[in-house]
Image (spheres, rainbow, N blue to C red):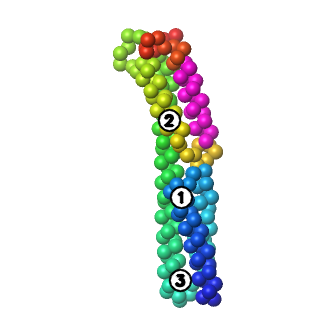
Amino acid sequence: QDRQVIAALERIRLVVAGVEHLAPCGHLRDSRGWQDDLTKAACQLDDLEVGHRPEARADRRALLDRIERAARAIDHRVAGQAKALSECVAAVDKVAAHVGTAPTAGDADSPGAAACRGMLAQAAAKLDVIECASEFQRTQRKAQLLRIEELEAELQRRSVDGRLYCL
């Protein structure tokens, strides 16, 4: 019985260690799998009968703490990438709104074509390094990159001497 408990704890420890190793640097496309592995490990720990073995109970508590920390680290990374994607969408939306309501050449308060191109270049650079955790995010990222290309083409078409003119 003791050997079975020790062996089960060791198997779970290996799973948790594997996720802890990958979570900080692995690609987020695998994050759902990591979370699933952690959930399964936690369930196995919940089902494990440790009886009156103080060391086994302490090991179980320690593993549950490690699982919780790893899950929070994954959630933090996923949330950070989602926030970065949202910021890029907002930047592209801002440029698209400006291009859609293009001011006249004399409007000094609005950004010109060069400023718009700069915002688009920054958004594209950020989008290039965003790790998407889901297919929805990947689709959204690709759509924003396509919008950036379209807006850059429109800016090129409508730009004269670095100023954006109305059509």
- Residue at the outermost left position: 108
Q: In 3D space, how far apart are the residues under numbered discs 2 and 1 (Cα atoms)?
A: 24 Å
- At 57% from the left and 46% from the top, the residue drawn is 132
* Mark toward the viewer: 3 or 1: 1
- At 48% from the left and 80% from the top, the residue drawn is 58
Q: Which residues are magenta?
A: 138-154
Q: What residue would you read off at disc 1?
A: 23
Left or right: 109, with 63 as reference point: left
The answer to whether residue 104 is above or below residue 17 is above
Q: What residue would you read off at disc 2?
A: 125
In percent of width and height, residue 151 lies at: 54, 23
Q: Are marks 2 and 1 in contact (CB under 8 Å)?
A: no
In percent of width and height, residue 107 lies at: 38, 14
Using the image, tell me which numbered label, if any, was put on residue 56.
3
The answer to whether residue 81 is above or below residue 32 is above
- At 51% from the left and 18% from the top, the residue drawn is 155
